[in-house]
Image (cartoon, rainbow, N blue to C red):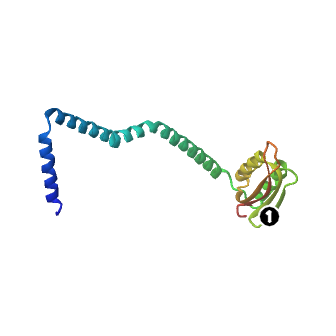
Amino acid sequence: MKNAPQLNALAASVRTHWASLAAREQTLVLSAAAVLGLALLWWLLLAPALAQLSASPARHAAVDAQLQHMQTLQAEALRLRDVPRPQGDEALRALQGTLAQQLGAATQLQTAGDRSTITLKAVPAEALAQWLGQVRGTARAVPVQARLLRSGTGAPAQWEGTLVLALPPT
């Protein structure tokens, strides 16, 4: 330790300076050091803990909302699992049966193997969302690709483009 002689000299210098201070000055220096120590203690230990404590109700509410959402998704997954799987061409027939009724006559369907491509023209967003939910449950069709553009500038959003659905194997 080559700094030890320097530290010893510094400590001796501080001790002699401390001894030369009046009792009142020593009391003031000790009080200032105590205030700085308490401020440092507050800043490093207590303030972060109190901030965490005050933020915990909001985080708890967010985690509760996330848990509720996950439980809803779990219930939906269990419900879908219990729905009987369509056999053979039932999935395709269910898809075709709801297509024109809910999305309009201009909607076209092309099927190749277990994939169905739906061409949409001016389909209201709400109708598309409801239809996707319905075919997911009844036909077990899952969207695998979507190329949609918003059409028109009206208040109810409308979509145009193609949507590829994967059907369950026959």
Q: Residue at x 61, y 50 (%)?
A: 77
Residue 129, given in percent of the width and then of the height, sits at: 74, 48
User: What is the quadrant of residue 20 in the picture?
Assistant: top left
Q: Residue at x 77, y 47 (%)?
A: 125
Percent across and percent down for residue 150 are: 78, 52
Point out residue 78 in the picture as x, y percentages from the top left corner.
Answer: 60, 49
As rendered, which of 35 and 83 lies closer to the eye? 35
Along the viewing direction, whichever of 39 and 115 lies nearer the viewer: 39
> Dot 1: what SS?
strand
Residue linked to disc 1: 111
Under mark 1, the amino acid is: Thr
Q: Residue at x 82, y 53 (%)?
A: 99
Q: Position of residue 158 (x, y in %)?
A: 80, 48
Question: From this viewpoint, which residue is outermost toward the top?
Answer: 24
Q: Is residue 70 left or right of residue 49?
A: right
Quarter occupied by residue 142: bottom right
> Furthest-bottom residue in view?
113
